[in-house]
Image (spheres, rainbow, N blue to C red):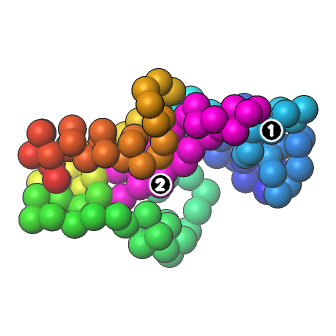
Amino acid sequence: MKAYIDAIGYGSGDISSGVDTFWLPRPGTTPITISAREQAELLAKLLDGTLPFLEKNVSILKEIMHVAQTPKGTLYGKTGSGTDAEGKANLGWFVGFVESRGCTYVFACNITRGANPSGTAARQIVENVLKAKCLL
């Protein structure tokens, strides 16, 4: 796993907190970190075929990420949420891409404020923007 993390340049590359938990922020651990910009750039490379993954595997990932289809476009993405040490929601994100009018647009929405900074809220923000831009 570390070899792939390094090969694709995923965020900080730090998986020292454990192979099955390195992406989870927990007290006393140092999770892997990646910015929203880095996530979008990495996803663009994946879709361009410049990362070391077979097209078959990228196709499977697209199937898993498919979340919405409209006459104007197809939306792919993954939500996520985080909590602070007291279990209060403090982070929400939605990372993905939309295929519309023959183009592919990648995005990463990361929210940390508001009454409910969840992945669901981040997805709603993205969908509203894409609909306003007539991409979805």
Q: Name the residue carrying label 1.
A: 26
Tally the marks: 2
Q: Secondary structure at mark 1?
A: loop
Compared with 74, 82 (above or below) is above
> Which of pointers 2 and 1 lies earlier in the amino acid sequence?
1
Q: Is residue 95 magenta?
A: yes
User: Picture coordinates of residue 125 (x, y %)?
Assistant: 30, 39
User: Picture coordinates of residue 92 (x, y %)?
Assistant: 51, 39
Q: Is residue 120 visible?
A: yes
The main secondary structure of the magenta stretch is: strand
Find the magenta span and give its range: 76-97
Of residues 69 and 124, the one drawn nearer to the viewer in this rendering: 124
Point 42% across, 72% down: residue? 63
Give amino acid for label 2: Lys
Displayed quadrant of residue 54:
bottom right
Mark 1 nearby-residue class (10 Å; few <14, some 14–19, many ≥20): some
Q: Is residue 23 magenta?
A: no
Question: Quadrant of the image for the N terminus?
Answer: bottom right
User: Picture coordinates of residue 77 (x, y %)?
Assistant: 41, 55
Relative to 128, is 55 on the left or the right? right
Residue 46 numbered tag: none
Displayed quadrant of residue 62:
bottom left
Point 35% across, 64% down: residue? 67
User: Picture coordinates of residue 57 (x, y %)?
Assistant: 54, 71
Q: Nearer the viewer, mark 2 or mark 1?
A: 1
Q: Name the residue carrying label 2.
A: 78
Relative to 122, is 132 on the left or the right? left
How far is the residue under mark 2 from the one under mark 1?
Answer: 21 Å
Q: Secondary structure at mark 2?
A: strand
* In contact (CB < 8 Å): disc 2 and disc 1: no
Mark 2 nearby-residue class (10 Å; few <14, some 14–19, many ≥20): some
